[in-house]
Amino acid sequence: MKAFAQLFLSLDETNKTNEKVKVLKDYFIGVPDTDKMHMLALFTGRKPKRIINSTFIRTWAVEASNIPAWLFEESYHVVGDLAETMALLMPRNEHSSNKTLTEWIAELNLLAGKTEEERKIWLMESWAMLDSQERFVFNKLLTGSFRVGVSQNLVIKALAEITKLDAATLTHRIMGNWLPETYTYAQLIQEQGAADDISRPYPFFLAYPIQETSEKRKTADEIQLALGEAGQWQAEWKWDGIRAQMIKRDGKIFIWSRGEDLATDKFPELHPFLNALPDGTVIDGEILSFQNGLPMPFNVLQTRIGRKTLSKKIMEESPVAVIAYDCLEFEGGDIRNKTQAERRVVLEELQAATLYPETFRISALIQFDSWQQLGEIREQSRAMIAEGIMLKRKSATYQVGRRRGDWWKWKIDPLSVDAVMIYAQKGHGRRADLYTDYTFAVWDGDKLVPFAKAYSGLTDAEINKVDYFIKRNTLEKFGPVRTVKPELVFEIGFEGINRSTRHKSGIALRFPRILRWRHDKPKEEADTLDNLRALLDG
Amino acid sequence: MAKKPLLEFTDKGIYCARGKFYIDPWKPVDDAVITHAHADHAYFGHKHYLAHHLSREVLYYRLGDIQLQTVEYGEKVMKNGVEISLYPAGHVIGSAQIRLEHQGEVWVVSGDYKTEDDGISTPFEPVRCHHFISECTFGMPVYQWKPQVQIFEDINKWWRSNLHNGVATVLVGYSLGKAQRILQNLDLFNGKVYTHGVIENTNEALRRNGVLLNPTERITIDTPKDEVRKGIILAPPSSVGTPWMRKFGPYSFGYCSGWMALRGAKHRRAADRGFVLSDHADWDGLISAIDATGCECVYLTHGYTATFTRYLNEIGFNAREVHTLYGGEEENPSNLSEGEALNEQVAPVNEALPLGEDLGGVS
């Protein structure tokens, strides 16, 4: 655990990519192989199981810290991270421990079969033998809230330099369903992919945005300059659903979401078409809710995903289908190195052969002769229930991760309204102890009705100014939430708008964020609820 | 009728009506007693100032031609029948707690203070009193400082490793207090100490005041960059991210502040290294300092006042929260202030910057 705690500390101590890679390499070289695999699992989002209920952890942490519970809560609001709060509040350790990461995780897993009292004893003893940095990472393991300030890419880069394997291969080998207890380092680095897990998905290829924000709108000429002739590109609608990879191998099917969650059971409607695919087929596409042959807005699908069990009702209200746009494996062979155009032919043949065209759809190609023309077509995105347009170079291979060059997303400009900030709450992580989470309202007659929360979009300097304003203009406090004097106006951008029975305003926004601070607008000139309703698609 | 208290909190500052003077007022008054020379305590525009000897040159440097009387710790000054004396606060060189006595009743205004002996400021001395007015900048139990010797060991080790890696070392801390505390604890076998103009001006003022500081070299337009990169650069918070600082790159940039105790605060400043070094008392320091006064009532002026007041009352003190303009307020880690940032931003009238110095924006 000492090495793992030091890894965290060292990663925290530098903002520079090269140094982070060096720190990661030093860690890999210095620890046993089982620790390497546990670290990989944790750093690639495979959260440890939460065995102890977090309410108990908190209660016992308060006890170990020897302060009143309310003060513990206040401290948490200041620190903004539970694991860190607990680590800071406990008295210095009197003993120390040399257990490895693997040993700690094994002990933690053993707690599953223990009583509450036994768990408490174990936890109290563990805290007493860890220093504050070790305690911090240990608490992260306990609470299962593992977020590290390094991307998977960097971890892979460090590992690639040590093992002399290429990054794409390693990325592929750590995809999918594996446990650090059973997947060994030797298996990970062996030269041949023998005995590969048949469920393993390929790393997703992700597109870069062609324009970052609506302020930086690109003209047809600029796109021509950046991407070259329109004829080299294939265009499709950018669908607003769940990105998924569907696998049929050895008679078995697997559906993976982009978050590397195995979601096979969540979409039973897709099973017939997947089962009917030839073995050794992998398809990349988007899962959406469909009705009468038309995609439905994302919130319909979202409601369905939120449910623990799939009732008959929800499946009737929100039946899903796939819009396929790529084929990564065909007849058991990895075809990611074929061109986009070649893979498209394979995909079209597969789809043409399906007996389930209702659930196995294909992403239609948009016909266009010039960027100018495509720009005009893009204006119809909302009517198509699409988020904009995807551009793929016809000669492109299917690559690993987010890469510039061959895949671009050209999203529609967000909708926007001017709104007044009325509530604020402190943020977490690097925004701890700063008011960064805001609730916005629009006018309904002479009342301000809250309609959206937004966290992002302001610069650090602006956040400091807003924070300063909030601390001096608080009307009321409700726990961590402050009611703020309605005065500051912001332009709020969002991707879509829908009716909602759950919100006071009767509407729900998709991806709300702050576009800019309207210093020029007094609160009286903010938008009204009627303005928002007028944007509803109907 | 109840007797009027000796001190009251007004919109100009802490006021002693009987003695007709203010302590650390933030609006112009006739007679001001100053705890220390940081800008949120020593404002411009008063007719008369009283402070400790060791604050003299810094006050002249920052506030210009003021009418200033200085005294030694423990020396008594009478104003309209109220006895005033200063006691060490351990915050920065020349910082003082103000003790007032009238008809057997004693009040103490702490100003800013820390309980650890930093080796350069006269160490904090508890003063028995009936009423204690205390800061509580770090009045949360998550703030617990390690002894400074450990922190300086880390700092010197970091400096050495930067030399080894061929990157320059930039260490950021407030120009009055933190900068000198760092300077006196650096391992000068590693190399020379170079200073930003704002820090060097303060150093010079302190040297005029008879304070012995380790040798430093002011960075001017003529200072060879390669030489600077072999030493360590002491810079104020206002220089972070400015072209002045960037020209020393590649560098590793360390930040010395109590706020560095929290990862979030450290990340916000994008510092390569955060060193938890504060000139304020930590949680235990505050409680032990308040306890040592034996006071009947403690008033909390700035910091996490609401939380700290509640806790003190729960453990048996008689504590009250009061509103002042010191520090930021309840939650000031958002600005760069540990009390002093104002200094760097409201560039005092005679902040004579050496020619050619590029300070960049100070936003």
Image (spheres, rainbow, N blue to C red):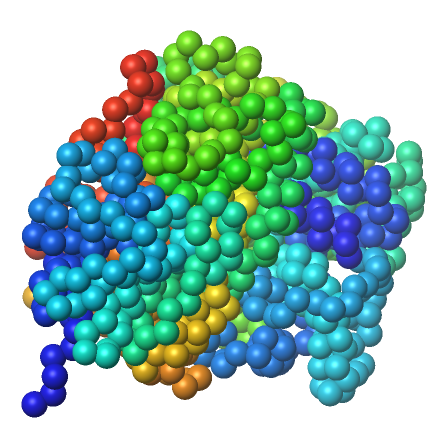
Q: Residue at x 15, y 59 (%)?
A: B22
Q: Position of residue A470 (x, y in %)?
A: 25, 58
Would you identify the image quadrant in which residue A349 lies? top right
Q: Quadrant of the C terminus of chain B?
A: top left
Q: Answer with left or right where residue B65 lies relative to residue A454.
A: left
Could you tell me which quadrant the N terminus of chain B lies in?
bottom left
Left or right, residue A332 beside residue A389: right
A93 versus B264 height, above or below:
below
Please state the horizontal and vertical placement of residue B205, each as a whole percent of the image: 33, 32
Quadrant housing residue A265: bottom right
> Residue B87 lies in what quarter of the image?
bottom left
Residue B312, image x and y in percent?
A: 40, 79
Residue visible at 42% across and 9% down?
Answer: B222
Residue found 66% across the figure and 37% down from its top: B157
Residue A330 at what x, y percent from top left? 76, 37
User: In the image, B334: left or right of B163?
Assistant: left
Q: Can residue B103 be seen by looking at this rendering?
A: yes
